[in-house]
Amino acid sequence: MFKYLIINKYLAREFLKVVGNMCFAFFCLGFFINLFEEINFFKDFDISIKTPLALSLLFVPSLIYNMFPFIVLLSGIYFFLKIKKNDEITAMKVSGMSNFSIILIPSLVSLFLGIIFVTSINPITSIMIKKYESIKGFYKIDQEYLAAITVNGIWIKEKGNGRNNIIRSSNLQNNHLMNLTIYEFDSEQNFIRRIEAKSANINSFTWELKEVQIIDSNGNILSNNIEKLSYISSYDIKKIKSLYSNLDTVSFWSLKKEIKLLEDRGYSTSEMRAKLQRSLAFPLFLLSMVLLSGVFTLGLYFKDNNWTYIFVAVITSVLVFYFNDFSAALGKTGKLPILISVWMPILIIFIFSSVGLIHANQK
């Protein structure tokens, strides 16, 4: 028993080392690629190199999180090849261990890493992405236009024609903002008037307000019971619905609250619910990647040709992630239930890995 404990501890430690080194390699690669993109973005701004460096440091951890299943797959293949090339696996088999027991320890480690990443790393990366978008958004051309969804409703800030407008709506129903209030300020931030409407059709940038009344800065009603009124905005229904286009800014612990908030405001929650299910499935996804890597390295034999293993790893990664994205897209469009679209790829990988694992364990 003590002998197996030492071997298992060794396998876990060495696998963690490989994963750590692979993460560092991907971090460096992602950092320099993103740094060039940030430098290109800021080429017309008078800033120092510190800003692109800081933005790259904020962005790359989220990239590593999203690519971690691919990193784990490559790490598993490298790790199993390493112990296979060094004949360590032969010594382990002599001591009574099977291929299954050798694959089991890295699999459990990956499962534990998945739980840590979802519960602890993801909240940190979401904060970093929020900071990244906040800093970069300051330099974007449309920085004067802001929108947010809060517990108090949908809020929009925009500038145009020498005026600053703040728009509030209680919720979104189909293509209409309901219970709309537009607060108009001049360029000196002096309040001019407010426009209240029961609803606004926002199919285009020219909104069609219905049941409108206009009130001046002193609270006097200037116009009442206006059946229709046009309002030129910088937002339409597509832009409003893209407020949560970057789900990386939402942490795992905030997902349920954000789903409830979107439901109350009339937004589709399919993407947010898909993200929740992907987060719950993340540890098992990592586990399936290790099982898959074990099947390819210990269950297949390519005459010690490492390039063949690398080719198999790359092709497998592409197929897995394309299949995963395709299934997720079916879930977002409503053609598949969210649960099935997220969990089906993992279940298929588990079935394939299980069959391969039985084959590998017989060797």
Image: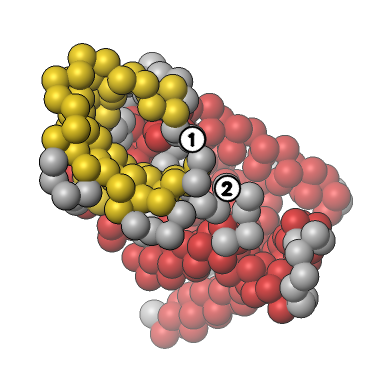
Q: Which residue is painted at 79% across and 43% down in the image?
A: 311
Query: Quadrant of the rendered structure where residue 75 is?
Result: bottom right
Task: Quickly name the residue at label 2.
Answer: 142
Left or right, 295 with respect to 155, comes to right
Left or right, 255 with respect to 146, comes to left
Query: Quadrant of the rendered structure where residue 252 is?
Result: bottom left
Task: Quickly name the residue at label 1.
Answer: 234
**In the depicted view, which residue is nearer to us: 334 or 290?**
334
Left or right, 212 with respect to 84, comes to left
Indicate the position of residue 31 as horizontal and vertical percent values. Answer: 72, 67
Residue 77, relative to residue 88: is it above or below?
A: above
Q: Which residue is painted at 33% across and 45% down in the image?
A: 184
Q: Which residue is painted at 75% across and 56% down in the image?
A: 41
**In the depicted view, which residue is nearer to us: 92 or 41?**
41
- Labels 1 & 2 near each other (Cβ < 8 A): yes
Left or right, 294 with respect to 335, comes to right
Q: Name the amino acid type tagged 2.
A: Asp
